[in-house]
Image (spheres, rainbow, N blue to C red):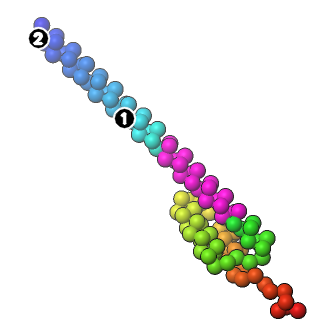
Amino acid sequence: MQDWILKYWIEVLFGLICAGLVALYRKLQMKSREQDAIKLGIQALLRDRIIQSYNHYHEKEFCPIYALDNVTALYTQYHALGGNGTVTELVERLKDLPTEKKDIKNII
């Protein structure tokens, strides 16, 4: 009788341990997917903000130093999250813009 109880309690205990490990694995897997989604979301927001800044200052034909500094900081974090490509080109184009508005009176 004692062997029977011992045998089944060990099986129950082993089953509970396995179920707990599976639950822990699933929870970690869900957290990992959630972290990936947050990373991609932040990356998309940074990309959008850099593109908006580029469009704004390209239209104005100049980019103030404070704006360029802000875009550079955004790009640094965007790049750290794995982003690159088109946004890199836009940041480089922003760096090529003058930092002050051209005064038409001085040109004529």
Magenta range is 33-52
Residue at the image point whose x is 80% and y is 86% from the top? 103
Q: Position of residue 31 (x, y in %)?
A: 45, 41
Q: Position of residue 41 (x, y in %)?
A: 58, 50
Q: Specify the label residue 40 is tagged with.
A: none
Left or right of residue 97: residue 4: left
| Element class at badge 1 | helix
Say which residue label 2 marks: 2
Report whether residue 79 is seen.
Answer: no
Q: Give the number of marks.
A: 2
Q: Inspect the magenta stretch and tell me whether residue 4 lies in it.
A: no
Q: Position of residue 47 (x, y in %)?
A: 64, 59
Left or right of residue 4: residue 32: right
Q: Is residue 33 above or below residue 99?
A: above
Seen from the viewer's position, the closer of residues 1 and 16 is 16
Q: Inspect the magenta stretch and tell me whether residue 38 lies in it.
A: yes
Quarter residue 64 falls in: bottom right
Q: Main secondary structure of the magenta part?
A: helix
| Element class at badge 2 | helix
Quarter residue 98 falls in: bottom right
Q: Nearer the viewer, mark 1 or mark 2?
A: 1
Say which residue label 1 marks: 24
Q: Is residue 49 above or below residue 107?
A: above
Left or right of residue 40: residue 49: right
Q: Residues within 10 Å of mark 1 (few under 14, many from 20)?
A: few
Residue at the image point whose x is 38% and y is 31% from the top? 23
Q: Earlier in the sequence, mark 1 or mark 2?
A: 2
